[in-house]
Each structure stands twice: as C-alpha cells, then as structure tokens.
Image (tube, rainbow, N blue to C red):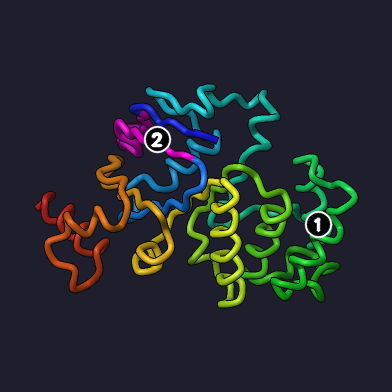
Amino acid sequence: MHIEVICARKSYGRTPALDRVSASIGPGQVIALVGANGAGKSTLLRALAGIVRPDAGEILYDGQPFSTEDLALRRRLLFLTDFPPLFQGGTVAEHIGMVLRLYESDGPDAPEKVVHWLRELDLLEKAENPVETLSRGQAYKTALIPLLVIDPELWLLDEPLASGMDPSGLHVFRAQARAAAARGRTIVYSTQVLEAAERFADRIGILHRGELRFFEEVAQLRKRAEDEGDGVLSAVLRQLHDEDR
C-alpha cells in the first residue's frame, strides 16, 4: 500500500491539530511519529485510520481516498489506540474471535495462529478470562493478537511502547513489526521513547504544533542535530522548542 498525505489540516475549535501535513509513505517501512504532547501524533494516526476526516487536504491509499463504506480498504489497515477498546462482557478468546470475524480472517488456520500468539504473549492461561479482569498490558496484548493474525498492509499504533506490556510483549511487537515490514507491510506508530525510535524506526516523523517538521531517516536527522549528547531526536526537538522562545 502506498499512502499520500496531501496538505492535511485538522482543527478542534481554534486549536490546529494538523497543519498542512504532507508525506509520502511507501510499503516496507517502520515509521515512528514523535513530538511533544499535543503535537498532532494521535490525530495523524486517527486520520490515517479514517476515524477523523481532515478539514482540508486529503489522504490517498493507492491513489484512492478513504471511505468508511469501502470495507475492503478498511480491512487493509488496523489501528490500535493507546488504550485499545475490548468487547466488554466477553473473554480474551471471544474478543480475538470477534475482531477476526470483522476482518474475515477467521479461516480454518486462525485457531492455530491465535493459540500460538496467546502462548507467545503469555496469555494462554487467560484465554477464558473476562477482558475486564486484565491488566493494562494484558489488555494491549489481547488487542495485539488480532493484528498479528490478520497481518494487515498498514499497522497503526498509538504509543505501543508505553502500553504497559512487559519486556516479552514489547519484544514480540518489535520483532513482528520488523518482520512485517520485511514482508512489505507498513508500520506507523507514535512514541515518546526517543531512544527506541532512533534504534527501531526506518524513518521518523517529527510533529511540532501540528506541523510535520521533519520526515526523514535517522541518518538525515543526525546531520541536522547540533548536539547529539542526549540523542539525535532530543537535540532536534530541543531545537524546535528553542525556536518558539
């Protein structure tokens, strides 16, 4: 999937959340969105997921605009919020099954895949537990499993590195995201963990007051940084902060 964001704007009242954001995103990349709180990271993810519609500009998927009525396109992407909603009143296994049915990914090989990821994420013993009894990290893992089984073309994740998952869960996410990119999938996630973004992402988008100020590889950002003592991203974000003073 090739994604084009063209001069996208989105405001909430008088507050601009996205301001003339443009980017071209090709397949096979892991992309980190970083920036201060309120910089526009979550809004951009929601716009890419079709949850919010830009006030101006457009977002194209293989040259076509997003439509909520286009189920085939909607099933090509999956968005995990920082607190993914689970189907209340059901068990872990029931939630996973419902999501797979919505994505028409509940074929004959699905149960084996689900059991595999339940085991890998230390949730197998929790499979019949109500979702209301889960910790935050366990809830995020529960939401992550359908993503791993469905393997959509576009993964959208809001703060997965601050999701409450334990080190084993974070390792699974990183390893599978990298493997998915190698298969041609596109992974776009937001994070405040700058060091992890520098090590893990292929490309980094830096948002500042709704503007996508940089959308580059780490090596390119390094050339812009004046002081790398605290890391490349810390230096670039500090420069943006200093510009506002």
x and y, in percent, of residue 211 in the image: 28, 40
Q: Amino acid at mark 2?
A: Ser
Q: Is residue 218 left or right of residue 200?
A: left
Lateral position of residue 25 relative to residue 145, left or right: left
Q: Which residues are magenta?
A: 8-26
Cα–Cα span, label 1 and label 2: 41 Å
> What residue do we see at 40% from left, 25% from top?
55
Q: Residue at x 86, y 58 (%)?
A: 111
The image's mark for residue 24 is 2
As drawn, 244 above or below 160 = above
Q: Quadrant of residue 210?
A: top left
Q: Main secondary structure of the magenta part?
A: strand
Question: Which of 66 and 112 lies nearest the eye of the viewer?
Answer: 112
Q: Which residue is mark 1?
A: 89
Q: What residue do we see at 60% from left, 50% from top? A: 183
Task: In the rendered view, tell whether residue 172 sits above or below residue 178.
Answer: below
The residue at the point 22 percent across, 72 percent down is: 230
* Most foreground residue, 162 or 90: 162
Q: Position of residue 58 (x, y in %)?
A: 43, 24
Task: Classify mark 1: helix, strand or loop.
Answer: loop
Quadrant where the image shows the N terminus = top right
Q: On the rendered structure, is 147 left or right of 11?
A: right
Which of marks 2 and 1 precedes in the sequence?
2
Residue 180 lies in magenta, yes or no? no
Q: Position of residue 119 (x, y in %)?
A: 77, 72
Q: Position of residue 239 (x, y in %)?
A: 15, 56
Give the amino acid at mark 1.
Answer: Gly
Vertical order, 168 against 187 (above or below)? below
- How many numbered circles are shown? 2
**19 magenta-colored:** yes
